[in-house]
Structures are given as C-alpha cells and as structure tokens.
Image (spheres, rainbow, N blue to C red):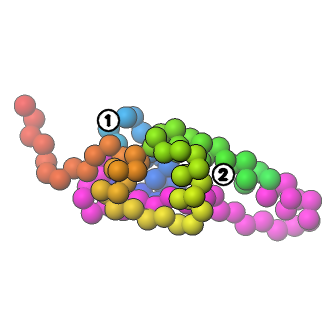
Amino acid sequence: CIGQACSMGAFLLAGGAEGKRHCLPNSRMMIHQPLGGFQGQASDIDIHAKEILHIRHRLNSLLAHHTGQSLETIERDTERDNFMSAERAAEYGLIDSVINKRQMPA
C-alpha cells in the first residue's frame, strides 16, 4: 500500500496473498462497516436493510479470517471508521509488514 487503503481498499489489501501484503511507513488504513443509502417503499427499504446486514456479517467474517482477529473484535472495530497507522495495521493483521527501506536484489 502506498498512501491510503480505506474501506473496501483495506478489505482487499487484507485479502491479499499472505506474505505479500506490505505498505510504506506513512500509509494509512481504515476499516468500517458497509454503508448504504436507500429510498422507496418501506418493504424495499426493509429488503435493502436485511441485505446490508448480511453483507456486514460476511465481510466481517472474511476480515476475521484474513487478519486472525476474532469476529467479535472485527465487529467492534468496524462499528465506526477505524483508522490505523502502518505499524498498527501490521499488528492487527491487515498487512504482513511495513517496508522501511528498499531491498536490494541478491
């Protein structure tokens, strides 16, 4: 990651190949629950509300799998926007490492 990986960007980063999820020291990550805006009849709003709750559970389960965090931790941490530094993202399991200097080929 160079810069920011927020929302679905952070989710996709976490789902990358293990051992290849890196970011630069000043990068920022942000996770949160899905967002949606709906209008229409009450029955349509109910359908969309149920769908977004289903999506939230599915995304949280996948994020728990890829980070090693418990589902309860993910649910708590995605309740509101949750910004992380590169170091915190590595501790959390979103990424594997922070690249602090260029590695020279052998």
Amino acid at dot 2: Arg
> What residue is shown with label 2?
56
| Secondary structure category for the residue under label 1 | loop
Residue 71 rendering spot, x and y as whole percentages: 58, 46
- Given residues 102 and 97, the one toward you in this image is 97
At x 65% / y 43%, what residue is drawn?
Answer: 58
The magenta segment: 22-49
Q: Is residue 15 visible?
A: no
Separation of marks 1 and 2 at Cα, in angstroms: 26 Å
| Occupied quadrant, residue 2 | bottom left
Q: Residue 21 appears at what percent x and percent y? A: 34, 43
The one nearer the camera, 98 or 43, is 98
Left/right placement of residue 75 relative to residue 105 reads: right
Q: Position of residue 74 (x, y in %)?
A: 55, 52
Residue at x 56% of width, y 41% of height: 62
Residue 98 visible within the image: yes
Q: Is residue 106 above or below residue 104?
A: above
Residue in the picture at 9% in, 40% down? 104
Q: Which residue is mark 1?
A: 19
- Residue 8 image point, x, y percent: 52, 53
User: Residue 69 lies in magenta, yes or no?
Assistant: no
Tell me the amino acid under the disc marked 1.
Answer: Gly
Callout 2 crowding tier (Cα within 10 Å): few <14, some 14–19, many ≥20:
some
Kindly identify the residue that appears in the image at 40 percent across and 50 percent down: 92
Residue 73, numbered label: none
Circle 1 crowding by C-alpha within 10 Å: few under 14, some 14–19, many from 20? few
